[in-house]
Each structure stands twice: as structure tokens, then as C-alpha cells.
Amino acid sequence: MPPSDATISGVAVQDDGKIVAAGDAFKDMVGKEVLVPAVLPCGECPACQADRRRICSAQIMPGNDRHGGYASHVAVPAKYLCPVGDDVLAAVRQMPLGRLFG
């Protein structure tokens, strides 16, 4: 989604990062909770091809370049998601800042 005045902000996607829909190759991830990175590299530029994704010149930021954490749903390529278990989520929510998100 290109940026526009209608883009819903929220750089950090927190709390219920649960997959509700996925393409055929990732159907097994539906229902799982995941961490969403704040920056998504393009995967195609010279920096990404050299495994230097942190300096990608075409990176996408949820909340800036597409709907972010305040939106009801956020579209993110599955290859950038990090599945987490209930034990990790419980530990994060026990941390002082984690209580803000759960």
C-alpha cells in the first residue's frame, strides 16, 4: 500500500500480532502469534542482495509506508515475521514495558 493521508500510523505492531490470513505457502502460520519488525527491507536492492538489509534504501516501515500498529490489520510479508511461543509472550508481558502491550 503506498503512503497516503489515509495511512494509519503505529510504527510498532504490538499486543495481538496474530496471523489471520496467509498465502498458500504459509497457511500453517494462520493463528500463530508473531513479532513484526519495525523496518521491512525490500529484498531486491544491492544492499539486500549483499545481506546488508539494515541499510536497504527501499525499506518499508509499517505506520509510515503502509498501515501500522494502530490499524486493525497489517499486511507484512511472511518471510519477515518471527513466530513466538506463549512462554515468550508471557515473559515480555511481565517486563515493566511489556505490561503496556498486554
Image (cartoon, rainbow, N blue to C red):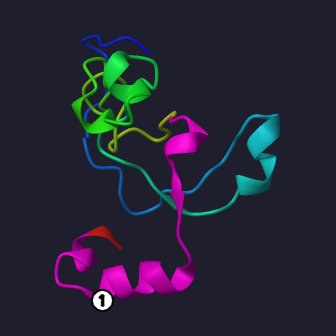
Furthest residue toward front: 50
| Quarter assignment of residue 5 | top left
Instruction: Name the residue tied to disc 1.
Output: 94
Q: What element carries label 1?
A: helix
Horizontal and vertical percent position of residue 29:
71, 55
Is residue 82 a member of the stretch shown in magenta? yes
Instruction: State left or right for residue 81 relative to residue 47.
Output: right
Count the numbered circles shown.
1
Name the foreground residue: 90 vs 50. 50
Residue 7 makes an appearance in the image? no
Q: Which of 52 and 31 is in front in this view?
A: 52
**Residue 59 image point, x, y percent:** 31, 25
Q: Does the stretch in magenta take in 46?
A: no
Q: Crowding at label 1, few (<14), some or many (≥20) Cα neighbours within 10 Å?
A: few
Name the quadrant containing residue 26. Answer: top right
Q: Can residue 84 be seen in this view?
A: yes
- Which amino acid type is marked by label 1? Gln
Quarter of the image where the C terminus is located = bottom left
Q: Which residue lies furthest to the left in this view?
A: 96
Q: What stretch is highlighted in magenta?
A: 76-100
Q: Quadrant of the N terminus?
A: top left
Q: Where is residue 13 in the image (x, y as percent from the top left)?
A: 35, 50
- Could you tell me which residue is drawn at 33 percent across and 80 percent down? 92
70, above or below 94, in the image = above
The vertical placement of 63 against 79, above or below, is above
Name the main secondary structure of what is drawn in magenta. Answer: helix
Q: Quadrant of residue 98?
A: bottom left
Give the left or right position of residue 86, taking residue 67 as reference.
right
Please report the residue visible at 56 percent of the width from the left and 77 percent of the height from the top. 85
Residue at 30% across, 68% down? 101
